[in-house]
Image (cartoon, rainbow, N blue to C red):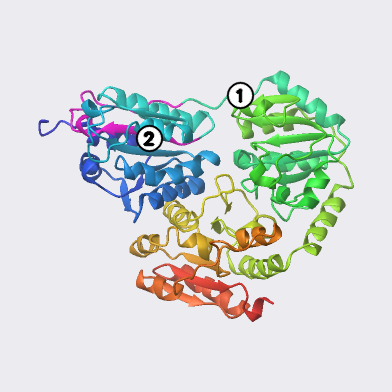
Amino acid sequence: MNSKDELNVGEATIKLLEQYGVDTVFGIPGVHTLEFCRGLNKSDIRHVQARNEQGAGFMADGYARASGKPGVALVISGPGVTNTLTAIGQAYADSIPVLMLSSETASYTLGKGWGCLHEVPSLTDTTAPLTAFSATAMNPEEVPGLISRAFSVFASERPRPVHIAIPIDVLEMPAGSNWQAIELPLRPVPTKKKIERACELLRSAKQPMICVGGGAWMASDAITEIAEKLGAAVIGSTAGKGIIDDSHPLSLSAGTVRGEVQQYLINADVVLAVGTELSEVDSFIETLEINGKIIRIDLDPRKMNDLYSAEVAIIGGAKTSTEAILKHLGTVYPRAETAAEVAAIRSEILDNLSESEVRHCKTLDVLRTALPVDTIVMGDICQLVYTGAFAFNVAKPKLWHYPAGYCTLGCGLPDAIGAKLALPDTPVVSFAGDGGFMFTVQELVTAAELKLGLPIILWNNEGLKQIQDDMKLRGIGLVGVTGINPDFLALAQACGCHALRIDSAQSLSDAVNAAFKADRPTLIEVMEFDAWLN
């Protein structure tokens, strides 16, 4: 047993997290995390009780998306980890810094198959494919090194999630020496030669274009200036939305999903791709047709020669790299016709909307007017959000979140809870569909308990409509996509929330404004086929 003043590993780990700036953790306590809880009682870190560990993982993800700081999920071994793993997969796909800190069965039982409580044959092997690294601390001395390694990844590399497991017997051991946070490494700096070569290509381009992803969020100002200097259209991925103001005359928003934008990209002779994978989930086609030379800026060297090989490969932070390009670009005569071309494509997109997309846009237009300009939108996987990616304007990065990479249903509500806790003075709203909402509906209780003034826009098309549409397109009879829904208003009220159904544009606007002022979440149900949207 420890002496009265000596910290055990569970307590010391929490104290060390506090040194790295952690102020909130999300999870559900269990018998295997009691020593972590002992540490939480002695710290200023807030523990948020989710109603399922998947919700805890999404909350940590949302916290990190909104704040830029690592989110932390604290869970038990076994089912706690596997429940959280879907959210970890989302964070991995979108390069979000999330630390999953878990317990593990006793160190002397690992690999023996004794059938211990919450046993997984190899817990870290289970989580390794969806993390930057996954490791088990087999003794107290290993813990601070693993924690520092995690925060080093978050600070200097592609910030993918990390899983650290600590066996229950190790959690109870004396921590020994006083653990201290280390000074974290910086992101790599681009070489002068690479910057000069990139500038040569951009200066000589006849029709340059810029593609941006979530990794470019800190480079918003420099990218906007480069675009203006070149007269280059800017095309965002879903994660890159708002890096240049969506209303800017050179912006095609998160338009990679639209065929009109994909056809326009073919014309580029030089493409500056910043912090983007140019992945299938941003365009929903296997590969984009890019004929021009590509300048890639990314923290991940593996992105330089994947489907889209780089003519110039710049490994470095987006902000540092784009500011260096801006400084060395010199005199360039901007392409004068780009703004008119962009305006024509925007108009063409609106002319080509489907009937459902027209209804989405009517709703989104009302919401855009009603929501404060700095509102953070946490989007679930639903058709309203698919349309919003190109049709809902945001002025800055990190105001629109739609995790298209892993594309898992159920993220919207818990992501919004995490975002609101990270930035309590910033308005946050969740957009969700009726199918996805049911995956994590229990987190309404968490949001109500926290008294969050959170509007939840529930787009109800009475089924898994995207899959219905896909089945119809392929001539497949509907299978498993038309199940009944609960009474969402009664369900939300039973969870301690306000709830109402919309019957007009004005009622939607009024409901959103009232929801921000409420002392609990408000479920705002919008029925896709109501008369006011026709």
Q: Find disc 1 in the rendering and name its residue.
A: 189
Residue drawn where x is 31% and y is 49% of the image? 46
Q: Nearer the viewer, residue 207 or 475?
A: 475
Q: Is residue 414 above or below residue 85?
A: below
Q: Nearer the viewer, residue 234 or 79?
A: 79
Residues rendered magenta in the picture: 160-184
Across and down, in percent, residue 82 comes to: 38, 43
Screen quadrant of the C terminus = bottom right
Look at label 1 and name its amino acid: Val
Across and down, in percent, residue 29 comes to: 26, 48
Q: Nearer the viewer, residue 315 or 223?
A: 315
Look at the magenta stretch and give its main secondary structure.
loop
Q: Find disc 2 in the rendering and name its residue.
A: 20
Q: How dense is the environment of label 2, judged by Cα within 10 Å: few (below 14), some, or many (20 and up)?
A: some
Screen quadrant of the N terminus = top left
Q: Earlier in the sequence, mark 1 or mark 2?
A: 2
Residue drawn where x is 61% and y is 48% of the image? 397
Total tally of numbered discs in the picture? 2
Note whether residue 167 is visible: yes
Secondary structure under badge 1? loop
